[in-house]
Image (cartoon, helix red, strand yellow):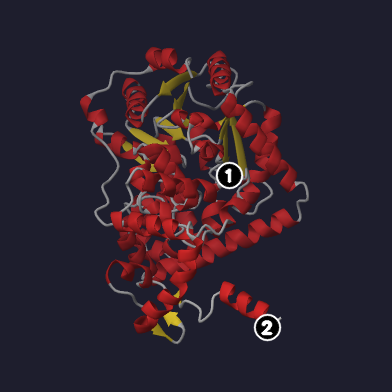
């Protein structure tokens, strides 16, 4: 990654004090409290069930009719790994080709630097109104708050993002930001914020949003987007969307800024074709998204539309150190959201309960990558380790393995609560001594007697009560397998 430093020194602006003051909102409640609140929210449960069930069914159906899907997933994984092995080379190539086409490339090591770069571009261009396409990278660095703090108006133009902006919330899903809201809730929100009565009908809601946003597109000085991919050998920025707002954000304002993590670079257009075939299928069950927009440089003299300036901000923010870290595979992620849709934990608690930018199984890994392992001391356990996330991932990221490694790290570094560390240490000690383990079974049967009702343990005292607060435990069997096997051997 040596080339990144000179580029950063060449293009990075001076950090003003106000550009460094913004940080992630502090969530006062613990993860268990957030999760418990989510499970009691009947509107959330209804919205999550409808949306995730639809996504999962559509994904299964479209892959069932796509026999080459598994081979393409394997190939996509290989491409991602090859890129990480030569990331500095592909970033150099991408930079050279973007600049050759008339664009500007900036490198940001941290979230603060990324915000400062974009703020500097906006100030130099005297920007007053900004329209934004959907961007998880922008959410990651809390870009909207920074721009508004600097006196600029920001309008989200993706329908889901527009809804949660009106609600003053953060996205609860990687591809469906407002997945946690029902149609009736959205209609009430529009009526309250836009002062227009609206029926709880998706077409009516969309029509109202389109009319409201159209004026903003025409008045905006700057458009900001993320990037699903950036093709190194052509300098092309690729946006994959299901709404036309992406094309309007990149073509109508006089300045376009694309913000992306450094891991989003891919070698060639041939590789892009592979990713496009599996991305939409994994995300929404479509063969192809409605819009695939390729942006290469600012507007040329012979062209009728496009920005006068194009800026690509390549952001590290903790990614590069994972090239040799335990979370390396998380850098393969395409942000399709498939792992969220099948996760039994996410489907019960939604995205906001995770308390950070990225929710779901992959979100736990991203949070650990961006904020450090201590930030996920509770989240690392927010998984059943059922493996469904690895099965649906379009690049076969082994999320369960990395979650287990995170848990092991929390224990080794003494970050996990001490009762938990003591319990698992005792279990490990016992499992390593077969004679004592065999003796433990009759002792456990004796000790559980006051708590067993109808073959289940429904409540335990003290610290152990946290296990039974939200689940029943099976009682220790009257005879273990080993005891039954010994009895069968004697009878034989």
Residue lying furthest right: 67
The front one of 202 and 371 is 371
> Would you call the spot at circle 1 few (<14 residues within 10 Å), some (14-19), or many (20 or more)?
many
Callout 1 touching callout 2 (CB < 8 Å): no
**Label number found at residue 405:** none
Where residue 401 appears, as percent x and y from the top left, is: 53, 48
Q: Which image quadrant for residue 106? A: top left
Q: Secondary structure at mark 1?
A: loop
How far is mark 1 from mark 2, CA to CA?
49 Å
The quadrant of the rendering that contains the C terminus is bottom right
- Which is closer to the viewer, label 1 or label 2? 2
Q: Secondary structure at mark 2?
A: helix
Where residue 23 appears, as percent x and y from the top left, is: 28, 38
Q: Give above or below for 170 relative to 111.
A: below
Where residue 105 appears, as percent x and y from the top left, is: 47, 19
**Label number found at residue 397:** 1
Residue lying furthest front: 490
N-terminal label among 1 and 2: 1
Is residue 163 in sight in this rendering? no
Q: Which image quadrant for residue 87? A: top right
Residue lying furthest left: 17
The front one of 374 and 44 is 374
- The residue shown at (60%, 18%) is 302
- The residue shown at (48%, 49%) is 403
Q: Give above or below for 464 relative to 289.
A: below
User: Circle 2 sits on which residue?
Assistant: 491
Q: How many marks?
A: 2
């Amino acid at each position: 990654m040596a080339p990144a430093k000179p580029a950063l020194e060449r293009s990075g602006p001076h950090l003003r004090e106000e550009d460094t003051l913004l940080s992630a909102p502090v969530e006062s409640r613990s993860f268990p409290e957030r999760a418990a609140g989510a499970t009691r929210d009947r509107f959330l449960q209804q919205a999550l069930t409808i949306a995730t069930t639809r996504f999962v069914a559509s994904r299964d159906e479209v892959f069932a009719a796509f026999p080459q899907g598994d081979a393409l997933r394997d190939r996509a994984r290989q491409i991602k790994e090859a890129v990480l092995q030569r990331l500095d080379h592909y970033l150099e190539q991408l930079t050279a080709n973007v600049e050759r086409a008339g664009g500007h490339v900036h490198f940001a090591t941290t979230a603060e630097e990324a915000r400062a770069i974009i703020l500097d571009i906006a100030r130099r261009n005297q920007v007053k109104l900004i329209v934004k396409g959907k961007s998880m990278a922008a959410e990651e660095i809390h870009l909207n708050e920074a721009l508004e703090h600097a006196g600029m108006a920001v309008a989200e133009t993706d329908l889901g993002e527009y809804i949660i902006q009106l609600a003053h919330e953060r996205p609860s899903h990687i591809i469906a930001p407002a997945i946690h809201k029902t149609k009736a809730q959205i209609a009430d929100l529009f009526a309250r914020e836009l002062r227009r009565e609206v029926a709880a009908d998706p077409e009516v809601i969309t029509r109202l949003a389109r009319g409201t946003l159209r004026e903003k597109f025409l008045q905006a000085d700057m458009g900001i987007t993320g990037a699903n991919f950036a093709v190194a050998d052509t300098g092309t920025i690729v946006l994959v969307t299901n709404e036309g707002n992406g094309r309007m954000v990149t073509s109508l304002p006089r300045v376009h800024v694309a913000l992306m993590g450094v891991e989003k670079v891919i070698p060639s257009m041939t590789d892009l074709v592979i990713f496009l075939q599996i991305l939409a299928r994994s995300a929404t069950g479509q063969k192809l998204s409605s819009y695939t927009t390729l942006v290469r440089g600012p507007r040329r003299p012979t062209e009728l539309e496009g920005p006068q300036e194009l800026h690509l901000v390549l952001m590290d923010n903790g990614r590069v150190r994972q090239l040799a870290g335990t979370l390396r595979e998380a850098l393969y992620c395409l942000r399709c959201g498939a792992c969220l849709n099948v996760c039994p934990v996410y489907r019960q608690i939604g995205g906001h309960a995770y308390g950070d930018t990225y929710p779901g199984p992959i979100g736990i890994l991203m949070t650990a990558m961006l904020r450090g392992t201590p930030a996920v001391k509770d989240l690392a356990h927010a998984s059943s380790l059922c493996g469904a996330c690895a099965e649906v991932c379009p690049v076969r990221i082994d999320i369960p393995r990395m979650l287990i490694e995170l848990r092991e790290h929390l224990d080794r570094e003494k970050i996990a609560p001490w009762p938990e560390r003591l319990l698992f240490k005792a279990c490990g000690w016992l499992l390593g001594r077969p004679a004592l383990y065999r003796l433990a079974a009759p002792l456990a049967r004796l000790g559980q007697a006051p708590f067993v009702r109808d073959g289940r343990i429904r409540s335990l005292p003290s610290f152990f009560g946290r296990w039974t607060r939200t689940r029943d435990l099976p009682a220790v069997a009257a005879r273990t397998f080993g005891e039954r096997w010994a009895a069968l051997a004697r009878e034989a």
